[in-house]
Amino acid sequence: MKNLGLIVVLLGAIALTGCLENGGGTEAPSNNNNGDFSVITEPPPEEPDSGTGGGSTGGGDNGGTVPQPSAPNGFDINKGEVLTASNNLLLDFYPPFTSAYTKVSEDETCSSGTFASFVGSRYHLSSKTNQSVPLSVQFRDHDGRTSVCYVRRIFIDQAGPEIVFAKYPSAPVEEGTDVEVVFSVTDPGAGVQSVTCMVGAVSKPCAAGTNKIVFPKLAGGEYTLKVSATDKFNQSSEKSVTFTVTSLYKQMVQNVKVNEYQKVDILFVIDNSGSMEYEQKSMASRVRNFLDVVKGLDWQIAVTTTDPSNSTLGDGRLVPIYGQTNNYILNSSMSDTVARNALGMTLQRPETGSGDEQGIYAAYRAIERSLASTATNKNFIRSDSQLAVVLISDEDESANGAKNDPANFVKYVQTAFNGQKSVSFHSIIARPDDKACLSGEGYSAGYRYEQISKLTGGVIGDVCATDYAAQVQGIAEGVRQTLKSITLSCAPVIDSMRSLLVLKDGQVYNGARTINGVNVVFNDMLPKGDYEVYYSCLK
């Protein structure tokens, strides 16, 4: 009987072993393929975690099962990273069925790639950098069945932080005055890790974001503020600005021949970037009354954009006049109705230009192109006219080159036209002290546009205003004042020791006048004649 019991136990063990080798079941499922042995599309049920101690997977004393972490849906980039300093990206694939082919596209629609043999992972070399890059993946099996389009994004950051100087002295500063420098340090990818500011061997406190450094009552000399920044990938960048403090003056004399033609050439520089979408919607109505105020003058009007790069509508090129063929310049001989509609619709830009707005640079380049008689700009600026620039933008000048500088702009106009042309620069901007605008539709304070308008006696308007009628009228009246002005080569110093003397045809001319920056503005139109202006400027 004992032997019989042992045999029964052995037979039971053998039977149990057979069941375990068959996966624990007694009959294989009969419908786990599509008839051609391709794998079904439904994913298998998740397997519970069996734990590390080999214990029960049921709901016993261990508190129940722990689910195994699921694989990423479709694919992942760099093991789930969302930011990288390399454009060579590691892709791991997790198809929903047994895949034979994989397609990788550098877009969000799986439309630009081509199918290649499936591998579990591979590297993808992106053509993009310093931006958020989309990748999409699609799978296909041997029968031609394709998966949904899986999309992931990763930010590729291969540049150090961006440093932009917004406010700094663009001309010599008188000794003993305070100097203010405003700049920003940003990094949209990895983020700013550290910022260092040095004036010679002296460190100045600064940080990521917008900085304002004040240098109080400086002595004479040359000063350089150097800003260095590093991002969290240890990528670095550096920029500096140099200014001069002096207590010395130079004596100036300027000869100007005045005619009575009342000619003025007006250049509109319009911000066509994406941030101006709100203002652009009603631009035509906002400037509708401009031509009413300049009526009676011999005017020409042209339009360019703040985009520094576009090969058709940027870099100072004049844009086509709306509703007219091969015409880039409006003039006072046109009917009021045609000119008013054409100007409004030309200013209301349909395209989305560069976010790297450079309005002073665009005006500078537009003048260069006109003097060179280049294509669309030919014949815009006449030799015997005055010049007015009207800028409309919700951001500041975004670069720091020589052609972005207010003082250099005035100097260029004076040099290019031998001191014979008066110039005024009017700005409709987010004014630096306008908190309501800056927290609303105004993207950033227009420090340099404010500076160039003050330098040339121009009007400074509010880009956030719902109606530009009042300030456009002020600008148009400012354009008229340009015809009564003499633009000097530098801002004159007027004090107890220094004055400004005007001669007409060799005799002292005492016509009432005011000084607005570099412009001497007379109350009345100047009589025709040869004028000499004596004044003093800082060196």
Image: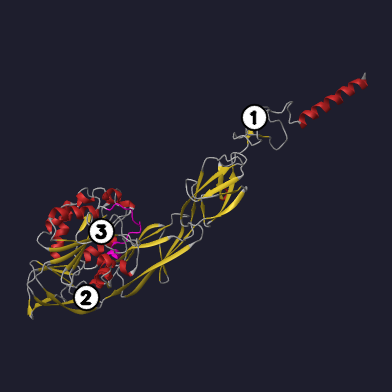
Which portion, as a residue range, is magenta? Answer: 349-363
187 left or right, relative to 535: right
Residue 516: in magenta span: no
Q: Position of residue 345 (x, y in %)?
A: 22, 52
Q: Tell me the amino acid under the disc marked 3.
A: Pro
Q: How many badges with numbers are in the image? A: 3
Q: Position of residue 96 (x, y in %)?
A: 59, 39
* Element at label 1: loop
Counting residues from the start of the chain, the first of labels 3 and 2 encountered is 3
The residue depicted at 44 percent of the width and 60 percent of the height is 161
Magenta span dominant secondary structure? loop
Q: Which residue in the protein does label 2 denote? A: 537
The residue depicted at 15 percent of the width and 71 percent of the height is 384
204 left or right, relative to 358: right
Q: Nearer the viewer, mark 3 or mark 2?
A: 3
The color scheme shown is secondary structure
Q: Quadrant of residue 183?
A: bottom left
Q: Residues within 10 Å of mark 2 (few under 14, many from 20)?
A: some
Q: Between marks 1 and 3, how big is the CA–CA gap?
A: 74 Å
Q: Which residue in the protein does label 3 denote? A: 320
Q: Work out which residue is located at the far top of the displayed protein and give it.
A: 1
Q: Is there any visible trace of residue 62 in the rendered image?
A: yes
282, 507: nearer the viewer: 282
120, 11: nearer the viewer: 120
Residue 350: in magenta span: yes
145 left or right, relative to 17: left
Q: Does the residue at mark 1 contact the one at mark 2 (Cβ under 8 Å)?
A: no
Q: Which residue in the protein does label 1 denote? A: 64
* Element at label 3: loop
